[in-house]
Structure formats: C-alpha cells, structure tokens
Image (spheres, rainbow, N blue to C red):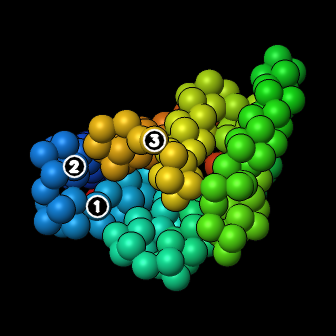
Amino acid sequence: MRTPRISGNRCRVLLAAFALAAALDLASLAVGSHGGHVVAKPLLMPLLAAWAAARGAPRLLVAALLCGWGGDILLLSDADPAFLAGMTCFAAGHVCYLALFGRRGTPRARAALLVPAYATALVTTVALLWPDLPAGLRVPVAGYSTLLVAMACAAAVRLGPVAGLGGALFLLSDTLIATGVADWPQPPRPDLWIMLTYLAAQFLLATGTLRALEARPGPMATYGEVRSTTP
C-alpha cells in the first residue's frame, strides 16, 4: 500500500534540494565562481531524477535525466573529446525522451503545426553555424541538432505546452552552446544563460511528462513502472 504522506514529504525534500543546488550553481556562474559551479552542477540532475522517481516517473524519464547528468559532468572539461562525449550523453537522453513521448504521448492536432516551424529552425540554424564550426564537429553537431529538434517538437506535439516549453528551452540552451563553439558573439555571462535555460528545460520536461501521465493514470503501470511505496 502506498504511503502518500511520506512520499509527498520525500518529494518536497528532493525538490527543495534541487532548487537549492540550482540556485547555488546559477549564483556561482553569476559571480564567476568556478568552484561553486563544479560543486553544484553534478548534484542537479541526480536530485531532479530522484524527485521524478519519487513521483512515480517512468524509467525512460529517469534515464533521460541521468544521461543529462553524464553530459553535465563531461562538459565541466574544456577538452574536445569531453565535449563530444558529453554531446553523446545528451543525445542518448533525447533518444530516451523520444521513446517516452512516443509511448506515452497523445498527438495534438494544433501542436502539429509546430513541425514545419521546428524543421525550418533546424535547417536554418545548422546552415548558419556550419561554416564557423570546427571541421570535426560539423557532422556531430548537425546529427545532435536533429535529435534535439525532434525531441523538442515531440514534447510539444505529444505532451502539451509544459513539456513543449521545456523542449524549446533545451533547444535554446544548446543553441547558445553551439554559437559559442562557432565563436559567434555571446551575451554577458553566457554560461549563466546556458545553465538557466537548461535547468528550466529539464524541470519542465520532467514536470510536463509527469502531469501528462497523471492525467492518464492507466498507462502508468503498462510497462511495469509503478509509484514507489517506500520513503
């Protein structure tokens, strides 16, 4: 038998811990404290994944968040191999999201109008970035961008506005990274804006997914993924 009160308390503690770690990370970036960023960043996705799991999240959602954790850790390094490995981790996360949205989402006719808009954004962005990207990153960035745009579009079309906004912010965050790699002009404190949009994206994707599943409780147990009954 579930214990909603204990589970609810656990969820609140985990969400508060995530919010605290996010505030520390963003404040560290705002003041230029690399040490604070290195301490806080590795805590973010595990806490968000733990919160999602406590809410009864499907395994694919938890896996997507933990893939983001791997990418976060790898991108703490400035080395090119770490960048490629981090991009691979995030790409795996997008595959998890796409599989999850395909299984659990319901296509929305009006949201489908976003498909050509996202396709246009993908082609335009890759075409503009291509000449300024290092030669060895052009194909990986184009492939990753395709996955990212597919995830963002599927979030909006299949899960609705909350997850859709999360997907759009993920796209914005990674576009900021790509423009930095291409050596385009950047806003002040670009790392701050990258992390702010990224954290909002992951939280909204998780929240939008959970809300969509809770609105249709039947499929929650279809794949053997049920809510936790322990604190």
* Mark 1: amino acid: Lys
On the rendered image, what quadrant is the N terminus found in? bottom left
Question: Closer to the observer: label 1 or label 2?
Answer: 2
Disc sitting over residue 9 in the figure: none
Secondary structure, mark 1, is helix
| Residue for point 30% across, 38% down | 188
Q: Position of residue 115 (x, y in %)?
A: 83, 31
Query: Front-most of 26 and 17?
Result: 26
Q: Which mark is residue 29?
A: 2
Residue tagged by mark 1?
A: 41
Count neighbours of disc 1 (C-alpha within 10 A) and say few if under 14, some if 14 to 19, many if 20 or more: many
Compared across the picture, whether 105 is left or right of 40 comes to: right
Residue shown at the point (30%, 67%) measured from the top left: 42
* Residue tagged 3: 185
Assess whether mark 2 and mark 3 are in contact (beta carbons under 8 angstroms).
no
Q: Residue at x 76, y 53 (%)?
A: 146
Q: Earlier in the sequence, mark 1 or mark 2?
A: 2
Q: CA distance from mark 3 to mark 2?
A: 19 Å
The answer to whether residue 224 is above or below residue 25 is: below
